[in-house]
Every structure is written in structure tokens, then in C-alpha cells.
Amino acid sequence: MKKMSLIALLALSSLAFAQKIDKIDKLEKVKNSNDKALLVKSDAADLEAKKKAAAEEKAKLPKPYNPKADAQSDINKLVAQAKKEGKNIMIQAGGNWCIWCLRFNQYVQSTPELKKLVDKNYLYYHLNYSPDNKNEKVFTEYGNPGEKFGYPVFIVLDKNGKMIHVQQSDVLEEGKGYSLEKTKAFFNKWIPQKS
């Protein structure tokens, strides 16, 4: 009988131990679930803060894209001007909705050596892509580079209007902005060739 009681006691102890482990597991799951909920709330708050900061930055930057422009007509005029001036045409495709497009424009305009390099060698055009005006015909003519690379994307035309290069912009980035050396190298590589 003592053996039976001992076995019963061991069985009850094992059952109680298993129930305690199960309870601990459940508490751990609840804790992990709460931790995940806090993490999700924290991530959501971080995301909202980043969105707000980007919106504030975007509001302060110049808006160089004109959704109402007749892009084909504008580019035709630039080709005629480029022939006279011996410059290439730098098309920065994107839109006022695109923070990186606005950042690049601001970076070039506010960095004296880049502005001088661009003004000397290029006629610069901001080709709009937005819900208001997707400029589908113009983008198709250049192989729809925004679909492949995103925005901004750069289309370089020679003085005769022939496309000589398409450049994605992410290779010019550094941190939360653009690299001076990479951007200068890009502009220098596509300056007009002297005949």
C-alpha cells in the first residue's frame, strides 16, 4: 500500500509540476504577446514620427515639377537651345510628391560647385510624373526608366536630343542625402564632348 501511495504521490507531483510548467508557458506567451504589442506600438509611433518629419521637410523644399507642363514641347525647345549652346540636357524625372526628388534638386541648387557644373554643361529639366500628369508618351520614348529604377531617375540627352544615358539615383545617395563625390562624378561623366 505504501508503494501505491508513493506512486500516486509521484504521479500527482508530476501532474502538478506539468500544470505549473504549462501555466508558466502561458504567462510567458502573454508576456511575449504584450512585448510584441508594445514593440508594434513603438514601431508605429516611430513610423508616424518619420512620416511627420518627412512631410515637414517636403513642405519646406522648392517644388520644381510642373504637372501642367507640356513636357514634349518643353524638351523640344531645350533640344533647340542645346544645339545653339553646345550643352547636354539633364532630365530629372520624378515629382513634387517624391522627397528624394526634392532633396536632389535642393542639393544641386544649394551646392555651389554642383550648380556651377550643371549650369555650365547642361540644360536641366524636371520631367513630372504624378497622378495629375504621368507624361506617359514622353516616358515611353525613354524606356520608362522610373518603372525600373524608381524616382528620381535621370535621363541624359545629347545636344541633338538623343538619349545617351539613364541613371538611377540611389547609387548617388549617402546616408540621408547625396554624396558630393558621386554626384560630381555622374555630372562630369556626361558633360558634352567637344568635337
Image (cartoon, rainbow, N blue to C red):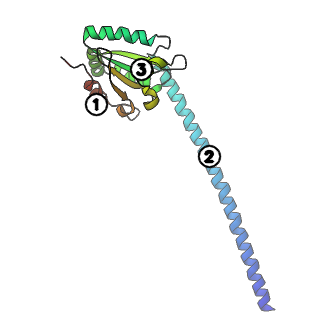
Do we see residue 109 in this rendering?
no
Q: Label 3: which residue?
A: 141
For the residue labelled by badge 3, is the local secondary structure a helix, a strand or a loop?
helix
Identity of the residue drawn at 79% across and 88% down: 4
Identity of the residue drawn at 36% across and 23% down: 155
Q: Identify whether 84 is placed above or below 157.
A: above
Circles 2 and 3: CB atoms closer than 8 Å: no
Q: Label 1: which residue?
A: 181
Circles 1 and 3: CB atoms closer than 8 Å: no
| Badge 1 or badge 3: first in the primary sequence | 3
Horizontal and vertical percent position of residue 42: 58, 42
Identity of the residue drawn at 64% across and 47% down: 37
For the residue labelled by badge 2, is the local secondary structure a helix, a strand or a loop?
helix
| Badge 2 or badge 3: first in the primary sequence | 2
Rate crowding at label 2 as few (under 14), some (14 to 19) or many (20 or more) other CA atoms within 10 Å.
Answer: few
Q: Amino acid at mark 2?
A: Leu
Q: Nearer the viewer, residue 119 or 36?
A: 119
Quadrant of the image occupied by residue 116:
top left
- Split into 4 quadrants, where in the image is the N terminus? bottom right
Horizontal and vertical percent position of residue 137: 47, 17
Q: Nearer the viewer, residue 129 or 32?
A: 129
Rate crowding at label 3 as few (under 14), some (14 to 19) or many (20 or more) other CA atoms within 10 Å.
Answer: few
Q: Amino acid at mark 3?
A: Glu
* 30 left or right of 39 in image: right
Q: Label 2: which residue?
A: 38
Gap in angstroms between the C-alphas marked 2 and 3 = 50 Å
